[in-house]
Amino acid sequence: MNRRHFADVTLLEPLRMIRLFMLIAAIGAVVIGGMQLNAQASTAGWQSYDEAEFMMAQNKGKTIVVDIYADWCPTCRAQAPILDELREERASGDVLFVKVNFDEEKAFLRAHRVPRQSTVLVFNGTNEVARSIAETNRTRLRNVVLGAL
């Protein structure tokens, strides 16, 4: 009797492991999916980078706030609500808010010497007037951006 019981437990163990693996995989998929939705949601209300439009805005002397982000970047996700708050406060149209995807816009990064994601630039026309790198402190990031506007 003990031998049979031992065999039943041995056969059930792989099934338990498969169920555990499936549960962990499902939880991981939900977490990663939520992170991607959060990153996509943070671009709402921002203008996606377009070289021609960016240069036209610079030539018109517009003030431009540029958020260089990556979907996978936790620092970028921490900055997003702070930058969204600034964008909403300055929604009058005198300031252009642009998102630059770190993984896709390599020419922009080279042209402006941007070494990493989570960089925020502020331009007055063609002149860069402020730069913040990986700042997640709300007060300091706001001061950098607002001080340049």
Image: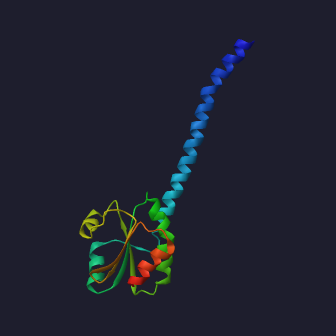
Q: Quadrant of the C terminus?
A: bottom left
Q: Which residue is located at x 37 percent, y 63 percent?
A: 117
Q: Position of residue 33 (x, y in %)?
A: 52, 54
Res 3 → quadrant: top right
Q: Is residue 8 above or below residue 86?
A: above
Q: Which residue is located at x 57 percent, y 39 percent?
A: 22
The one nearer the camera, 136 or 63, is: 136
Q: Is residue 12 above or below residue 145?
A: above
Is 137 on the left or on the right of 10, as rendered?
left
Q: Which residue is located at x 54 percent, y 57 percent?
A: 34
Res 141 → quadrant: bottom left
Q: Position of residue 69 (x, y in %)?
A: 40, 65
Is 104 on the left or on the right of 28, as rendered?
left
Q: Is residue 92 above or below residue 54?
A: below
Q: Which residue is located at x 61 percent, y 35 percent?
A: 19
Q: Position of residue 120 (x, y in %)?
A: 38, 72
Return the residue found at the far right. 1
